Amino acid sequence: MSRTGDHVGLLDHLGIDRCHLYGQCIGGSFILSVLKAQPERIASAVLAQPIGRVGAMPPGRSTRFEAWAESLTDHPEATPQVLDAFHRNLYEPGFVYCVDRAFVSTCRTPCLVLAGHDEAHPYPISEELAKLLPNGELIQEWKTGAALTSARARVKEFLAKHTPRT
């Protein structure tokens, strides 16, 4: 089963017909995959520090990926070939690693994007996602002080606004 299939399967198992999703880092990419597969199940989504690639894929594997791969010493199934395939599956598609810009521009689900500001979570990806999403909104600063207080309130308002009334 794919990671999207795993996520949808969990919703099915828990009997969840409709929900909000929150994902940080690669969790934002996973949300976009679920939105592509079953948009009717997602009332809204918050994507915090979404990952993605600006420009061409550099050769080789990133330092972070290598460090993670080296931590798998107790997993003999994590052969170099498996790790190479996993790396390609995660990162070669580009943009946000799971869906293309054309899909994002048609995704009607309300999405709140909390911007990233580092190499793994490039600001241009957050900015482009928020611009492409027809019902997207970007919060540029949200990690500390007054910006964090303001962002918390905005996330609560956003989720309340998009919570279906029964």
Image: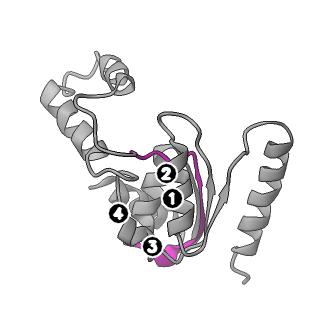
SS type, badge 4: loop
Which secondary structure, mark 1?
helix
| Real-space CA distance between mark 2 and mark 3, rounded to the nearest whole angstrom | 14 Å
Q: What residue type is labelled 3?
A: Ser
At label 4, the amino acid type is Asp
The residue shown at (55%, 65%) is 131
Image x and y of residue 95, in percent? 37, 53
Q: Residue 39: within the magenta?
A: yes
N-terminal label among 4 and 2: 4
Q: Which residue is under mark 3?
A: 105
Mark 2, residue position: 125
Which is nearer the N-term, disc 1 or disc 3?
3
> What residue did someone put label 4 on?
100
Give the mark nearest the N terminus, 1 or 4: 4
Q: Is residue 59 above or below residue 73?
A: below
Number of residues whose C-alpha sits closer than 10 Å to that of mark 4, classed few (under 14), some (14–19) or many (20 or more): few
Q: Is residue 164 left or right of residue 150?
A: left
Position in image of residue 69 (x %, y %): 30, 23
Which residue is rendered at x = 78% and y = 59% of the image?
Answer: 154
Q: Real-space Cα distance between discs 1 and 4? A: 12 Å
Distance from the alpha carbon under mark 1 to that under mark 2: 5 Å
Q: Distance between the residues labelled 1 and 3?
A: 10 Å
**Pick the front one: 79 or 29:** 29
SS assignment at label 3: loop
Q: Residue at x 48, y 63 (%)?
A: 11
Looking at the image, is mark 1 or mark 4 nearer the viewer? 1
Identity, as a three-letter code, of the amino acid under mark 2: Ile
Please count the marks in the image.
4
